[in-house]
Amino acid sequence: MHELSLMDDLVRVITEEMAEVEVHVVRLELGESAGVMAASLRFCFDVCIQGTALEGARLEIVPTNGNSLNLKEVEVA
Amino acid sequence: MCRVCGCDDATNTTHEVHSAHGHRHESGHEHPLDAHSHDGHAHAHGVAGHSHAHEAHESAHGTDDQPLARVAKKPRHSRKSGPKKAVRATLAPEREAPSRVVQLERDLLVKNDGLARKNRDFLRERRIAMLNLIGSPGAGKTALLEATIRTLRDELDLAVLEGDQATELDAARIARAGAPVVQITTGAGCHLDAQMVADSIAALDPQRGSLLFVENVGNLVCPALFDLGERAKVVVMSVTEGEDKPLKYPHVFRAASLLVLTKLDLVRHLDFDVERCIDYARTSNPRLEVICLSAQQGAGLDVWCDWVRKQQPDGARAVTL
C-alpha cells in the first residue's frame, strides 16, 4: 500500500519538473532492501499517471543493492 | 519477435517499416506519429499507401492487394492481441530526433526522511521523546498505552497521537485513561508518515519534556518503512498472533529497538513458544530488546515502564517546594 503514496510523490515530482515536455520513460532504481515492491510500484504507476501529463509513459525499474528508491532519469520527446 | 517494436509476431522478423511511421502497443509504448490501433495490436500508418516491405511480414498481414483482413483498407496483423510485456524499443524512430534523457536523481524515500528529520529537531529542541508503536490490529497497542498512562501519568507528562483508518474510538480510550490525544484518521492510508505526524504534533502541542507516544495504524508491514522522527520504534506483538510472525514480517523487527510481547496471560492457553519467538525476532535484529507483559493483568508492566522512563531522561517533573 505504501507504494501508492511513494508513486503519488514521484508523479508529482516529474509533472512539476517536466511540465513542458512529453515524458516517454520513467526510470527508477529500487534497492532490494527498500521495503518496496516493484510489482506494486508498477500497479500504482498505472493508477497515478491517469489524467496527468505522464499518461502513456512507461515505467522501468532497475534493481540495485541497498535500501533506497531513486528516481534516476526520464526519457522525453 | 519484431526487434523494433518488440511485438511477438510469429514471423520472427523486424518490422523495419515501423520506424517510418507511428506504432502503438497496448503495453503503453508507442512510436510517435499518427498511430491507430485495431484488434489490440495497434499498427500505424503515417503515410497513405503504405505497404509492408518484406514478404514474411506480408504473409502475416496479407498484402494490400489481397489482405487477410482489412479495416478501412489498411493491412493488419493476423494476431488478435498485442504483447502484454513491456517491450524494449527505441522510442523514437531512427529518423526522428532521438529521445532525450533527463537525469533527475531523487531519492523518493528522502521526502519523508527529510520531514522526519525536521520532526526530530523540533522534538529535540523541546526535549520531547517520541516513541512509535507499531503492530497488527488487535496486538494490544491501545491497551498497553492505557495501562502505561495509568501507571505513569502522575510522574511524566504523557501525550498520544492515535493513528487509525477510521473512527476516534482509540482517542476516546486514551482520553479516558488521562492523556491528551489527537486522533489521526488516514482514510485509505496504511501507515502514518512524517507529515501527518508533524501536523498532529502542532495540533497536540505536547509539553516540553513530555513523552509522546505515536500509535501507528494497525499494520505490521508498511509503518516499518516510514521514519516519523521518533526516538525509537517499538513493535507490539501479541502471543495470539503466532510465534512465526517475526520470520514472516522481518522488516518491522529489523527497524524496531524493542519488541513488546503482549497478552502474556493467554500464553498458557496457546501453543506459543516465547523463547522461539524471541529467537526468530533476533534473527532479523540481534540487538532487539524484548519485554513480555500482560497489560490487563499487569505482569511485566513495571519492566516496560522502566524502559519508557529511560527514553525520557528529562521527563521527571520538577518538584516545586
Image: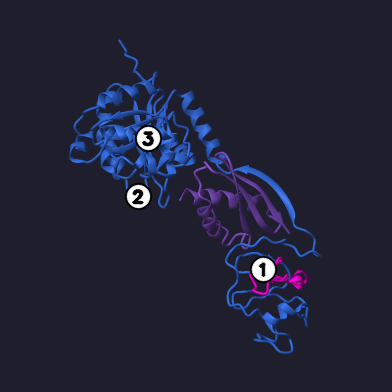
Chain colours: A purple, B blue
> Decide: marks 3, 2 in contact (CB < 8 A)?
no
* The magenta segment: B1-24
B292 on left or right of B88: left
Q: Earlier in the sequence, mark 1 or mark 3?
A: 1
Tell me if residue B87 can be seen: yes
**Circle 1 residues within 10 Å: few <14, some 14–19, many ≥20:** some
Chain bearing mark 2: B
Q: Is residue B152 above or below residue B163?
A: above
Query: Foreground: B202 or A8?
Result: A8
> What is the number of the mark on residue B281?
3
Q: Nearer the viewer, mark 1 or mark 2?
A: 1
Q: Amino acid at mark 1?
A: Met
Q: Nearer the viewer, mark 1 or mark 3?
A: 1
Q: Residue furthest top?
A: B321
Chain bearing mark 1: B
Residue B205 x, y percent position in the rendering: 41, 32
**Residue beneath the point at 60% across and 59% down:** A52
Chain bearing mark 3: B
Query: Foreground: B143 or B26?
Result: B26
Badge 2 marks a residue whose secondary structure is: loop
- For the residues labelled 3 and 2, the Cα–Cα distance comes to 30 Å
Q: Which residue is mark 1?
A: B1
Quadrant of the drawing holding the N terminus of chain B = bottom right
- For the residues labelled 1 and 3, the Cα–Cα distance comes to 49 Å
**Residue beneath the point at 25% across and 27% down:** B301
B65 on left or right of B319: right
Residue B210 x, y percent position in the rendering: 38, 25
